[in-house]
Amino acid sequence: MARRIGNKVVIVGCGPGSLGYITLKALRRIQEADVLVGSRRLLSLFPEVQAEKLALGGKNYRPLLNKIASLSMRKRVVVLVSGDPGFFSYASLLINKLGKETCEIVPGISCIQLAFAAIGRSWNDACFVSLHGRKTALPRLVEALKTRDTVAVLNDNAVSPGLLCEFLRKEGIKGKKIYLCENLSLEKERVRELDFSSLEEIEAEGMNVMIFLSE
Ligand SMILES: C[S@@+](CC[C@H](N)C(=O)[O-])C[C@H]1O[C@@H](n2cnc3c(N)ncnc32)[C@H](O)[C@@H]1O
């Protein structure tokens, strides 16, 4: 296969949202960038970086893949993703498009790590389900809750915790301790221990991880 000319695209995991959780390696790569690509929230973490900034969001995820590929022929492009690039992230679209040889991946701290740290539990045997942008994962969640003792759910509020709880009850899920971990590492961080009856009343604010434990 012919060798590609150009720079590797650097995909940097930026952690759960606060600067304190960005690694030194990630910071170095970001400071070296000619072009920074990322959500407005992640770009706003680096106002001092002089790079050209391209906002990722809405419906431009796929069109930006081509732009990133062509820019990287001339420039050092750094793509910011939240948490860790290997966990439910834009990184997989990029790697599929460009090939793994063309990407450098800088790991980050995942929201999952913070959520389990906040509740003082191990995630050794946990199962993960993402409802972020995909309600189609609901049947997988039901299956996981029926068969696994520790299930962590990534939610973007497309499904409110109350509605989710109602749905799960109808599917015969019960007897779980539930932790709702919102806005981890951010100003409005909140971690609450709940059960199905208290969860029905609750609207989550912002990004959240829900952890279900068998009692
Ligand atoms: C597209 S996924 C990205 C996950 C990311 N790659 C990681 O490793 O944390 C986005 C989802 O992660 C969760 N999430 C990300 N940051 C969070 C935070 N600071 N607090 C709570 N949940 C968060 C939310 O469930 C959100 O809908």
Image: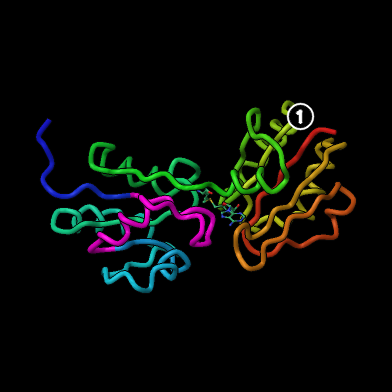
Q: Is residue 147 left or right of residue 106?
A: right
Residue 18 forms part of the magenta stretch = yes
Type of amino acid at the residue the image marks with label 1: Lys
Query: Is the residue 204 above or below the residue 95 in the image?
Result: below
Query: Is the residue 158 above or below the residue 178 in the image?
Result: below
The answer to which image quadrant residue 37 occupies is bottom left
Whole-percent x and y of residue 103? Answer: 27, 43
User: Closest to the observer: 75 or 129?
Assistant: 75
Whole-percent x and y of residue 12? Answer: 37, 51
| Quadrant in the picture for the N terminus | top left
Residue occupying the point 17% across, 49% down = 7
Residue occupying the point 60% across, 59% down = 185
Residue 153 forms part of the magenta stretch = no
The answer to which image quadrant residue 93 occupies is top left
| Quadrant in the picture for the C terminus | top right
Whole-percent x and y of residue 54? Answer: 32, 67
- Give the magenta range: 11-35
Instruction: Tell me the residue that label 1 is attached to.
Output: 146
